[in-house]
Image (cartoon, rainbow, N blue to C red):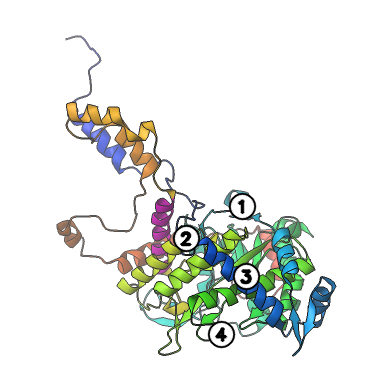
Amino acid sequence: MPNEARKPSRRSGRRERLAKAAAPPAINPAPPGQVGGQYKPLMDTDLQQIFDTALRLLEELGIGEVPDRLAALFLANGAHELSGDRISLPPDLIKSAISSAAKTFTFQGRDPARSITVGGQAVHFGTGGAAVQTLDLETGLYRPSTLSDLHDFTRLQDTLTNVSWFTRCCIATDVEDPYDLDVNTAYALIRNTTKPVATAFTLPEHVAPIVEMFDIASGGDGAFAERPWLKAHISPVISPMRYGEDAVDVTFECLAHNIPVSLITAAQAGATAPATLAGFLAQSLAETLASLAMVHVIKPGHPMVFSNWPLVIDLRTGAFAGGGGEIAVLNAASAQLSNWLGLPSGVACSMSDAKAIDAQYGAEKGLTSLAAALAGGNLIYESSGMTASLLGVSFEAFILDNEMHAATYRALRGVEVSEANLGFDAICDAVLGEGHFLGGAQTFEAMERDYVYPELADRDMPRSWQEKGAPDAWSVARAKAREVLQTHQPNYLTPEQDAAIRARFKILSD
């Protein structure tokens, strides 16, 4: 028989379909930056009442313990003194601060491809926290966090697609000197990732020298200020309704060096803010507006994330509670308020009270992170790696949370309705032809475009799962974390940059 082109057999066609199905999607069907805002726990009248109450608090109660140089700027911009050494911030000043605030800004990565836009309704999960304990990969128990842990967490998350930026997640408790701690924390960030990063400065005098380190990593004197790829986390307002002098001074220094800031209010319901949810939101909004007003009188329009983080305590015991329905709805409402004002919003979630990687961990993280995302929180802090009511951080949690974020981003993407997606012809062809949709062109297209497939979650039949040794999520994530830490050993500094930094600073790691 002549060598003629033969049609592929049904068996070879099936093999091709199976191979295609097993391959990962060519593109990420739901990358970070999906649009939130679908969940609105507050009605428009609620938003207005909360805002009006916040304005009244700032004007009539005012803010206490205002450092002298900040008080002088406020008074020059329409504020006035109240009894008890408090400063009244009038509505016109607050509204002017809102009007002139940066509504969106680019949070730069040292790798420009990893930069993100902050503002609008775009949602990004990232990290936060200052955990003093690490869940050990070997023992499964907590121990004090170390500088080595910080390096390991930084390079681990460098591989995680759904973590948009990295804030140091733990405190190196083995570094006692505050200046050495700030220096070595900053070094761990710039050595191990090119994502946008964030840190905190213990004292204002630490800012300028550490910016010198950033200049070295950016290519020369003044280079960092021209394209800042790090933001500072600062809490200049202490609840209830007063400033903290050291944090205010750090803010002045960061603005002077063109460092974007996340100014964080972290009141606790029933302790430093009202136990009623509405009252809490009014006070917390007032305090975060006081931070915005401070930026406005120092450097109008400077990039600031309006980081209004409602926190909750268990009123039975006084212990911080990072998981539960109250913290989910409060942070969602905070995001809604910030977005209603047109400000780049920052909220917190996934602050599970669970110590182990267990059902409590999963339930609390899933509930709070989805609520914050659906409400449109622009930057969602604490959302990766944190355990034990923010006292702990876990390598396995980073791995599992990254997968959780992928599912959340897919939920935010929603359903695209079009003639092609409705698929009238495809339905007719399947019904009148094969009787199913497996192998159809529309099915393969949707598989690539519309579905996120987990890498860790187990979708096997029970028998197959048992044959693999019945692994649980904790053990699967532990194995993945170990694999990443063994294989991903980046150094994003050139030898010349590293040598220049070591010559200038006391670097405590190899």
Residue 399 image point, x, y percent: 41, 63
> Which residue range is magenta in the image?
396-412
Mark 1 crowdedness (10 Å alpha carbons): few <14, some 14-19, many ≥20: few
Dividing the image into 4 quarters, which one contains the C terminus? bottom right
As measured in the structure, the alpha-carbon distance from the residue carrying label 3 to the one carrying label 1 is 42 Å
Element under label 2?
Answer: loop
| Quarter-of-image position of residue 54 | bottom right
The residue that disc 3 covers is 52
> What's the mark number on residue 111?
1
Where residue 260 sits, quadrant-wise, is bottom right
The secondary structure making up most of the magenta span is: helix
Q: CA distance from mark 4 to mark 2?
A: 25 Å
Q: Amino acid at mark 1?
A: Asp
> Does residue 36 appear anywhere in the picture?
yes
Q: Closer to the camera, 242 or 483?
A: 242
Q: Which residue is mark 2?
A: 40
Mark 2 residue crowding within 10 angstroms, few (<14) / some (14–19) / many (20+): some
Determine crowd level at label 4: few under 14, some 14-19, many 20+ residues with C-alpha closer than 10 A: some
For the residues bearing labels 1 and 4, Cβ distance under 8 angstroms: no
Identify the residue at horizontal 53%, vertical 72% (top origin): 169
User: Is there CB contact under 8 Å for labels 4 and 2?
Assistant: no
Q: Position of residue 311 (x, y in %)?
A: 50, 77
**How far apart are the two marked residues, 1 and 4, measured between alpha carbons?**
40 Å
Tell me how far mark 3 sits from mark 4, CA to CA: 20 Å
The question of residue 16 being in magenta is answered with no
